[in-house]
Amino acid sequence: MTVKDLPAEPSTNHWAERQAYHEHPALGSGDVRRLCDSWAAFEAARRTPFKATAASSIGSATHLCLLEPHRAGELTPWVADCGTRTAKAYLDLAGKAPKGAIILLAPELERVTLAVRGALRNPLVARILDGAQCEQEIYWDEPLDRYGRSGKLVQGKGLIDFVPANGLELGDLKTTSDEIIDADAWGRTLASHAYPVQAAWYRRGWAERHPWEGPRGWVWIVVQTVEPYLCELYRAHPTDLAWGDSRCERALRRYATHHGRPEVWQGHSQADADGWPTIETVEMARWGRKGEW
């Protein structure tokens, strides 16, 4: 695909609308993952402006083409006909683009095209997206009473990639440049990126906004953005979702402990009742125990 192959830009674009979601101060799934690490990590990330990379731009464009194909024309003005992100053509285009726009190099657009074609070769993709509600923004309130902050609450937010029409699941589309995306490889990716935490957070928000529904499962569409451009679908294991739920609770507990309390220890260890860090007992990783005792 080249720039001229894209449909004409629609009269209404949604960059500002999507940017408003990302800038909303409610807790997103990334905030939750960082809160599980430490309050310091959470605050540092909030102070650091997002900077698009080749991987994030390819991922965002693939999302748009698969989940909102009617918006594909919005990519048209923001494809730089050059090969590097340091080229003048790219930098000039980036300087003109509205905030939140997806800016691609011409070779990156080709990868997006191949990734989308590869995804659509999997018949399950069309089946699960048929009639689905895509890119669903949700906001909800999380009371902090049970974490010792009576009368306080924090707002949560989620951007759910697709809600299948079957009424049984929610789902997320992930792109990857990994050369292998079989079940074992995806299991390792889930662990390294803590994706079940995102799933648990979004399921939590959906349940809060739709209390009349039963619990929903979770599905990932995994799209490869390198050769051989395969696409697989995987369901989340109930044990992983339960682990994600526990991490959400940990994050909310830490938020309740620290918000508005700069005197409380902000590191990895839990603070005690006086706000001081605690000393944890740590066991060496089992694989490190080599040789004779």
Image (cartoon, grey):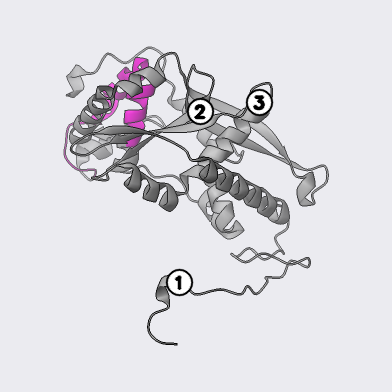
Q: Earlier in the sequence, mark 2 or mark 1?
A: 2
Would you say the residues marked 1 and 3 are in contact, meaning their CB atoms lie under 8 Å apart? no
> Would you name the residue on which mark 1 appears?
286
Mark nearest the camera among 2 and 3 is 2
Residue shown at 34% from the left, 47% from the top: 184
Q: Is residue 114 left or right of residue 231?
A: left
Identified by mark 1, the residue type is Arg
Q: Is residue 132 left or right of residue 177?
A: right
Front position in the image: 89 or 41? 41
| In the rendered image, the vertical position of residue 106 relative to residue 290, given as above or below | above
Circle 2 residues within 10 Å: few <14, some 14–19, many ≥20? many
* Coordinates of residue 66 in the picture (x, y in percent): 34, 23
> Would you name the residue on which mark 3 appears?
209
> Would you name the residue on which mark 2 appears?
170
Is residue 133 covered in magenta?
no
Residue 203: name its quadrant: top right
Q: CA distance from mark 1 to mark 3?
A: 43 Å
- Kindly tell me whether residue 74 is visible in this rendering: no
Would you say the residues marked 2 and 3 are in contact, meaning their CB atoms lie under 8 Å apart? no
Identified by mark 2, the residue type is Leu
Circle 3 residues within 10 Å: few <14, some 14–19, many ≥20? some
Identified by mark 3, the residue type is Arg
